[in-house]
Amino acid sequence: MSDTELKAKLRFLPTGSALHKLSALITLLLLILAFSIMSSAFFSVNNGLTVLLQTSVIGLLAIGMTMVIITGGIDLSVGSVLALSGVVTGLLMKAGLPVMPAMALGVVTGGVCGFLNGLVITKMRITPFVATLGMMMIARGVALQLTGAAPISRLGETFGWLGNGALFRVVEMQANGFPKVIFPGIPYPAILLLIMALFGAYLLQRRQIGRHIFSVGSNEEAARLSGVNVDRTKIWAYTASGALAGLSGMVLMSRLVTVQPNEGVMYELDAIAASVIGGASLMGGVGSVSGSMIGAFIIGVLRNGLNMAGTSAFIQQVIIGVVVIGAVYLDQIRNRK
Amino acid sequence: MSDTELKAKLRFLPTGSALHKLSALITLLLLILAFSIMSSAFFSVNNGLTVLLQTSVIGLLAIGMTMVIITGGIDLSVGSVLALSGVVTGLLMKAGLPVMPAMALGVVTGGVCGFLNGLVITKMRITPFVATLGMMMIARGVALQLTGAAPISRLGETFGWLGNGALFRVVEMQANGFPKVIFPGIPYPAILLLIMALFGAYLLQRRQIGRHIFSVGSNEEAARLSGVNVDRTKIWAYTASGALAGLSGMVLMSRLVTVQPNEGVMYELDAIAASVIGGASLMGGVGSVSGSMIGAFIIGVLRNGLNMAGTSAFIQQVIIGVVVIGAVYLDQIRNRK
Amino acid sequence: MFDTAPTHAPLVQMCDIHKNFGGVVAVDDVSVDLYPGEVVGVLGHNGAGKSCLMRMLSGAMSLSSGEILVNGEKADLKTPQDAKTFGIETIYQTLALADHLDAAANLFLGRELKTRFGNLDETRMHAEAKAALVQLNPNFKNLKDPVSRLSGGQRQVIAIARAIYFQAKVLIMDEPTAALGPSETAMVADLTLRLKKDGIGIFLISHDMHDVFDLCDRVMVMNKGRNVGTFKIEDVNKDDILSLIIKGTLPDDWTPRGETS
Amino acid sequence: MFDTAPTHAPLVQMCDIHKNFGGVVAVDDVSVDLYPGEVVGVLGHNGAGKSCLMRMLSGAMSLSSGEILVNGEKADLKTPQDAKTFGIETIYQTLALADHLDAAANLFLGRELKTRFGNLDETRMHAEAKAALVQLNPNFKNLKDPVSRLSGGQRQVIAIARAIYFQAKVLIMDEPTAALGPSETAMVADLTLRLKKDGIGIFLISHDMHDVFDLCDRVMVMNKGRNVGTFKIEDVNKDDILSLIIKGTLPDDWTPRGETS
Amino acid sequence: GEIAVIVKTTNSSFWQNVNKGATAAIEGHAEHTMTFNGPASESAINDQVALVENAINRGVAGIVLAPSDPESLAPVVKRAYESGIPVAIIDSALAEGNDQYYQTFLSTDNCAAGQQAAAMMIEDAGSTGKVAVMSYVAGVGSEVGRVGCFVEYLSENSDIEVVGPFYSQSQMATALNQTTDILAANGDLIGIFGANEPTAIGMGRAIEQAGKAGQLTAIGFDGNVDLQDMVKSGVLLATAVQGSFQMGELGVNAIADILAGNSVTDFIDTGVVMVTKENIDTPVAQNVLY
Ligand SMILES: Nc1ncnc2c1ncn2[C@@H]1O[C@H](COP(=O)(O)OP(=O)(O)OP(=O)(O)O)[C@@H](O)[C@H]1O
Ligand SMILES: Nc1ncnc2c1ncn2[C@@H]1O[C@H](COP(=O)(O)OP(=O)(O)OP(=O)(O)O)[C@@H](O)[C@H]1O
Ligand SMILES: O[C@@H]1[C@@H](O)[C@H](O)OC[C@H]1O
Ligand SMILES: [Mg+2]
Ligand SMILES: [Mg+2]
């Protein structure tokens, strides 16, 4: 039965989606190899942990984005929602709320934005691109208006804990009075990402909602005729995407120890690129969380490695553009065989 | 036969696409009415011409975007291609080329970028979103690298002619030494937009290439089986979009009398919004140039009117987001009847 | 398991059903009923409105006017889900399969089997699906392929299996054998008779006169959206039906065949 | 207009055609030929490989191995366009219509009529389309509706009209009447015979035995991707064919019926 | 009448502080109103041109403008002139040859500020080794002067090797990630310069998080509370603070003066203060901090 189970695992990954992930993984490994040759500092425990940390925000966004993309939709609002969630948390903390409930409400804010996206898409029948484009502007405008465009600072040590804390961190006090980091620890954001990715994959592959998400993206009319509640499924996916955007907002703002209302611009493109590099199809019906994580790390490693190698910011853009296309192409050729 | 002809005109506008445009037009008129009430300066010849001028860049982009969207694709690269075309023109002029050939080569640059998009999409089989996302980064990176991110200035009076000139302009010198503008003239960019829009509509509605564009977006496999050269059709559409991005780059940079390698960020979203408000479907097979022009003017009027009314930039964003969704929704309800 | 006497209260009554798309009238005040254990053929030329009429009973299309009664009570069938709760299952002309999912996932779509932890029970769904499909096509292999890779007939078999698996009370079959080979067609005919024996009421849309005469108890003929006649199958012959389908009227000399013969 | 004697050189020869998708063998070294003025039935169970075989002749699918000769010369059919230049037209099982375009636009898709300025000649295309469609379905109305709004049968009629309009030399019909009502089916049968008389060679995929025996000169039966026999229609009866389709072999006692009778 | 204050972008505390200055100034001129506006980012120059055009169309009494680009804004400033609308330029210069079209110019000398920061860098870190430059948006007016002169000064007055510049697009998280990477890749960095507010904050956080505070000379730019905290804690040696409040305040006052028929001087230096741990509590610094 284990053969059956294995196959069952792969069944939603059509035209050899195991290959899909394999080719993305190869791209990732090639990148790591190339950068290790170019810069000795790249291939170190420290830097590995940094990449984990840096990728966690895009990674969290990519989980929700993947779900939305599998339904055949898209969520352009995640970058703005991330900022709005952060702003809400920041204002609540300024109003005296402790960090945990404030952050929880920040995530809820993201979820509410996503829920509204879902409502507009299903009940008003607006295409996802337009609906979430609207939300992108609205959430950004509200975030800026609420703060007068100024960062919210001095939120206290505890606010930075989520983004900057780490498990098994070892620090030593130096003679000069400044601390020295022996082992930076596994960053909490990376742990959070792992948990959310596993949970997301579980929902998509093992739960009814996941099955319905695939069916809606594969053939919406067929799903409807089969008795799938298409509207509820879509609303669920957009709410998840919004909540994850809220969560990534918490991580990001906590890393900055400041709430920045204009943070997160164009993050949606990174999240979409991660999903697509990882094999999700913008036509719907195809995608996986694990693939998207590989996609997110391809982008993260690329940014980090190019910085480490001291590449000009402009050439970096060109290279990232080429790699995004190249990664998807590599996948294409593998699939065609 | 005139009835037949009329119907023939409307045949590509399914589910009452005449209604589509009608509802967009109503939105536009409502906006104009509202702003006229709010600000006396809004409804003036002067300001009308300003809106024409301000909308011409988005309008030009929207023509190409509409063609691409009808094929079922999307072009995220237009904003960057616009900048790269401008940079090429600027560098050529610095190298001594006169303005006309330099601008022509700028448009060609745009066309080449679009052609490359088309090749990547058809020959490498990369989805349009990813291919043009890659081009977006590549073109921007190249534009910044070529200029070292610095604007190219002092291109001379003639460079500003296309963007700042106007037909039938009347200026008078006043006694106090200040000149007085009697009639600001019809801006050249507006005239260019009109010509390109008419030409685009003609190609889409009356020529074989237009028919093929609709068929590819409607059902790519069917078009292929019918003997339509799907690849060539798509490449054509992306090349047109690129060339129009180049042209709008000429208009924009000429307006600024400087080449700005940073200009045009997020313009693709405005162009897409214009097309969709005007009734184009991101699923392909549906759209019209006239609709997209109305869409572009909805956005243009909104931006101008809100500025005139002194609305805060943040609230403006929120309002534009709401109107974009609202305009598409209005259309939805009309269609459902 | 159900009341098998066709003389009892009708399972389904569709009364004065009307459907128009803007100016186009697709279904024009049609009434028809269905008793348990009965097969009613729905016939008509292309575009006569057969699929539209049936889609309204499936909850897949809204009524412009008219009323549907199930077991004598008014049923408001707004969604396919509503219809399914009344035990109305449909094999759609378009099949309605999610291309990226495999046969089992499609069969159980919307009604997935779960383990006691609420997870999808893939093992059980596969086993059940296999059993159901093999009944209809003994050499159905590509059970784990996404259905987009299956042939037209294989897809049709999945659509049929899905409709009968859930113990329908009313089954709507919209040209179920159009894409099927001869052995598959024969199996569907067998199946129809078996379901009928179980007391299920069946609406069968078909263009195949043989199927119609082999399987139906009554036939209802539509022409340009209208019901141009409902007959016991004994009362009509092929030519009567063709005349109704094509011209919308019976031959001038018609009298119920059942009585004359 | 063409040479009508079926004894001449074959119009099409498909030699050792093989097609596999990864491990799945869809067509297994099949050879078949077609003469002018001849109708060859292509039969087989669902998933036998009929559509795949024909799609390779249409230029819609690439060959894994094998060779296609048209008029005795090797033809490299890479795209549907290539096939059309050889005069090979196809009615696809999936119809292959662009949903947002109307009937005329679909009929002329890829081969639009133009005015002398190179503009689309809508008036002429509509008139021609109307004439072509009315031949097949006298009350075809919704001529200016996008085809997505037409019924299954209406769409089928457009697909048929498109294939015959351009004076094919070879016509491939993949279950052309599956969705058609009785009168439309009869018209397609008439049409087939008329085209045959004009010297056109026709491959007809069908599951309907009546059609097959009424229309075909020869039949080729496929089973699990292999050609299990090609026969003159006089030499086989319905049971022979069913046995070939289902089991892949002739009944044990078979001898060519044409000789025995 | 209406005095339109049009800045490079409204999305930053620096420009919001200009807004505060302008708002404070308008209180003193009951006969005028003030509107504050700007595009979504400092690189959206075309949008800024549109804002000025719209202001002219609605017949404002005067304009206070921070041009995102020296040349691109010149045609519209000329249009304002042709329409008889007085203009005060703030923060960044307009291209040469346009002096007659505006009435006064109030600014920090960005080039001088960059040089001051560079001088302080050499003084504290020494004149050999690597210094990283974390910039914001490539090519905008203030960046060209500020970062350009910083780099130029280093190369002319020391043997320092410049790493970068890197561009954060004024995104704090981008600056954080970039700085983290640069610190990891260049363990031997002796100094680092963060050229505007979000960039300097992101840079400071990266230094704190890498545990490198105090191990290299870090200099920031602009002066919100986060940067003040970083100066106090020693993460940053100094931050260069411009009189942004003053730009808004004096700009509006200048226009009001012109409208009242008074003449104004054609250049007002709003100054820059290098704020350090030592001087942060002095009035000079407190005057410009926000
Ligand atoms: N969504 C729709 N919008 C507009 N018209 C429609 C729609 N669906 C069906 N029609 C029209 O309604 C009429 C009836 O269509 P229907 O599909 O019920 O025919 P049918 O009897 O099932 O034909 P067939 O035998 O070809 O399947 C047709 O004229 C068709 O064009
Ligand atoms: N694109 C494809 N990818 C993978 N397998 C395919 C593909 N197309 C067809 N097949 C497989 O090839 C085999 C033959 O399919 P084909 O469509 O030719 O059957 P058919 O004889 O036309 O059947 P039907 O009567 O049901 O139309 C089937 O097993 C099918 O699953
Ligand atoms: O001068 C301005 C600067 O001080 C601020 O930090 O960023 C934008 C600049 O133009
Ligand atoms: Mg039907
Ligand atoms: Mg087939």
Image (cartoon, coloured by chain):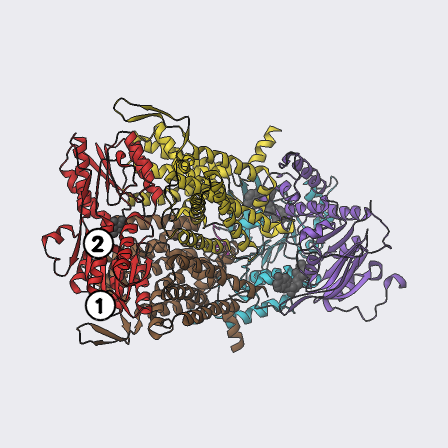
Chain colours: A brown, B yellow, C cyan, D purple, E red
Above or below, C220 relative to A325: above
Q: Local crowd at mark 2 within 10 Å, few (<14), some, or many (≥20)?
A: many
Q: Is residue C80 magenta?
A: yes
Identity of the amino acid at label 1?
Ala
Q: Is residue D229 magenta?
A: no
Q: Position of residue A61 (x, y in %)?
A: 37, 61
CA distance for labels 1 and 2: 19 Å
The residue tagged 1 is E213
Q: Which of the two labelled residues, at mark 1 and mark 2, occupies the earlier sequence position?
A: 1
Identity of the amino acid at label 2?
Asp
Mark 2, ligand 3, within 8 Å: the answer is: yes
Placement of the C terminus of chain A among the 4 image quadrants = bottom right
Q: Quadrant of residue C247?
A: top right
Q: Secondary structure at mark 2?
A: loop
- Choose between B10 and B252: the one closer to the eye: B252
Q: Specify the subunit that label 2 lies on.
A: E
Say whether residue D55 is left or right of residue C87: right
- Choose between A180 and B147: the one closer to the eye: B147
Q: Secondary structure at mark 1?
A: loop
Report if residue E11 is visible in the image: no
Report if residue B193 is visible in the image: yes
Q: Give the number of callouts.
A: 2
Say whether residue B86 is left or right of residue C34: left
Stretch in magenta:
C76-86
The residue tagged 2 is E222
Above or below, E50 relative to C141: above
Q: Quadrant of residue A40?
A: bottom left
Mark 1, ligand 3, within 8 Å: the answer is: no
Disc marking residue D101: none
Q: Position of residue B9 (x, y in %)?
A: 56, 35
